Amino acid sequence: MALRRSRAEDLENQLNAGALWAVTYGDLMSYMMIFFLILFSFGMGKKGGGSGDQANKKYQQSLVSIQKNFGGKPSSAELQRAEARVKEETMATNLQGEMARQNLTEQAKIETGEKKIKLVLGAGVLFDSGKADLKPAAQAILSTVSEQLRTVGNQIVVEGHTDNVPVRSGQYGSNWELAMARAYAVLRFFELHGVPSSRLAGIGYGEHRPLGDNKTAEERARNRRIEIYLIRTD
């Protein structure tokens, strides 16, 4: 009798062990479905440009869903972070679209990273040589940028960069001074156009952080630039 019971128990254990793969497989498929839903929702937000609000909501809902699957109900801080990240991505997408609409894709480069979103503007589209006064055409460009910056609450850092050609005349005694004056001009414009001054900071690097080697006119032009950083939500 005991032998029969042992065999029956062994058979039951084998059947249960054999069914474990189905549980693991089911969990894997659930996670894969949520993962691809996030990718799909995020991609729709990118394609939609300024009209991706619905897709962004789906993206946020997907984040909440995957958090629940991996460890319970998300906290309010996690929800706020997810919402802030969606706003940051939307801002970057909209800004890229505006730069393309103004035919500035060669002079304006947008890079999205985990810690920062960076907009690089060639100094030639903003300033005359050796000057820190914004060109009339720069007003329209920076108005577009400030409009997008107002949609988020992140900290913003403006960096001024120059080439290594010495400043020979004018009110600035060095490239360092010129770079700082240009960064301040952009900061001041943002402040006057509704971006809170508490969110703004400026740095002048002069010639000391070049992108190229300054040996050709093209490389020197590439080094003369303004970099605008939006510090992403932690």
Image (cartoon, rainbow, N blue to C red):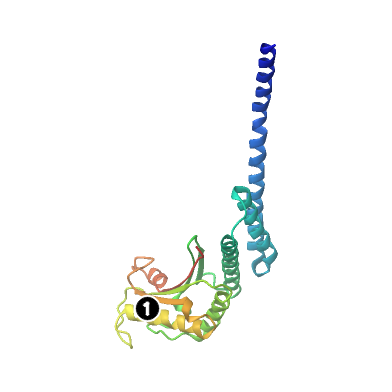
Identity, as a three-letter code, of the amino acid under mark 1: Ala
At x 70%, y 64%, the residue is 54
- At a point 37% along the width and 65% down the height, the residue shown is 212
Q: In the depicted view, which residue is nearer to us: 135 or 208?
A: 208
Q: What is the x, y in percent for residue 48?
A: 67, 65
Taking the image as shown, residue 142 lies to the left or right of residue 16, namely left
Q: Quadrant of residue 182?
A: bottom left
Residue lying at 45% horizontally and 78% vertically, measured from the top left = 124
The quarter of the picture where residue 10 lies is top right
The percent coordinates of residue 72 (x first, y second) are: 61, 51
Relative to 72, say whether 81 is above or below: below
Relative to 229, 16 lies left or right:
right
Q: Quadrant of the N terminus?
A: top right
Within 10 Å of disc 1 (Cα), the crowding (few <14, some 14-19, many 20+) is many
- Report which residue position mark 1 lands on: 179
Nearest the viewer among 109 and 144 is 144
Number of marks present in the image shown: 1
